[in-house]
Image (cartoon, rainbow, N blue to C red):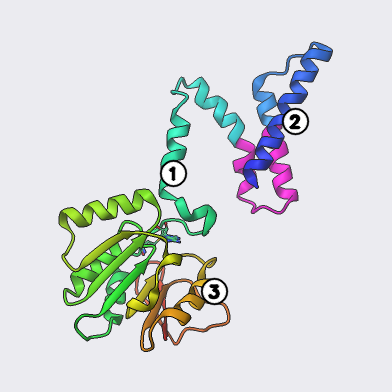
Amino acid sequence: MAVILQVVAGVIAFGGAHLMAQGLGLAAPRLTVLLAQGGMAALASHLVGLGWWWLPIQLLLPPAVLLVGDLGLPSWLPLVLFVLLALVFWNSARDRVPLYLTNRATAAAVAELLPPESGVRVIDLGCGLGGLAARLARARPDAFVTGVESAPFPFAVGWLYHRLVGPANLDIRYGNMWRIDLGQWDVIYCFLSPAPMARLYDKVKSEMSASGLFISNSFAVPEAPADRIVTVDDRRQSRLLVWSI
Ligand SMILES: C[S@@+](CC[C@H](N)C(=O)[O-])C[C@H]1O[C@@H](n2cnc3c(N)ncnc32)[C@H](O)[C@@H]1O
């Protein structure tokens, strides 16, 4: 929506400037046209109800493009940055899940929650760079830990790290968590966002075998209170929500 509004505002601003130049012989400075574009995009974003943080982004993006041009930076640089960001935040637009990482203290608390039996199978759905999965695998050499990730860049980093120095009981896979049969795991861990939780909980309930554990870092499931909540003694007082399936 933000991109569409920015493009429409650009067409109106530059179209208007062109008509003014043709009809009245008035050439508007480029910065004025870009500020008009940003202003219209910000106003339209507000009117359609986008979050407040979109307003400064919409307002400042067009003049920022001019600034990049004036700095003499190569014109391909923004495209390369965009592609890199897209490879990292692959799931932000579709699944509304960005990349942020489970910290060390929370990983230790998750390891404490794993059942004591040897051979327990654990999966991190959306494993990012694979750090949490690697920590669990090291904390429990008797367990089999899998991380699945669908964003290309974090997957590539996690996979390469695992190949080079990862523990033997860790497997990092490229894949979409919605296409994975969750029946194979005893413990399912995720650190996603509020958006997919209801759908994921339904999938867990219908596929995971009885006596499994479902652990969500921070994000609750609407209308399905957790059986247990563990508060981690870290800076953000992370909460691990645990369901016994
Ligand atoms: C907040 S990060 C958590 C990373 C890691 N689990 C951790 O705790 O450090 C969420 C990750 O889930 C990934 N993700 C989101 N939707 C996914 C999907 N449908 N399939 C696989 N991975 C997904 C994102 O790309 C992102 O890397």
Q: Which residue corresponds to mark 3?
A: 198
Indicate the position of residue 3 as horizontal and vertical percent values.
62, 42
Q: Tell me what residue is drawn at x 36 percent, y 84 percent.
A: 212
Q: Can you tell me which quadrant of the image ligand 1 is in?
A: bottom left
Indicate the position of residue 63 as horizontal and vertical percent values.
60, 29
- On the picture, is 59 further left or further right than 231? right
Q: Tell me what residue is drawn at x 44 percent, y 23 percent.
A: 73
Mark 2 is on which residue type?
A: Ile
Q: Is mark 2 on a helix, strand or loop?
A: helix
Residue situated in front as seen by the camera: 106 or 124? 124
**Which residues, given as a range, are shown in magenta?**
36-60
Q: Which residue corresponds to mark 2?
A: 12
Mark 3 is on which residue type?
A: Ala
State which quadrant residue 143 falls in: bottom left
Marks 3 and 2, how far apart in space? 41 Å
Is residue 104 something that shows in the picture? Answer: no
Marks 1 and 3, how far apart in space? 27 Å
Q: Which residue corresponds to mark 1?
A: 85
Is residue 229 something that shows in the picture? Answer: yes
Q: Which mark is residue 45?
A: none
Q: What element carries label 1?
A: helix
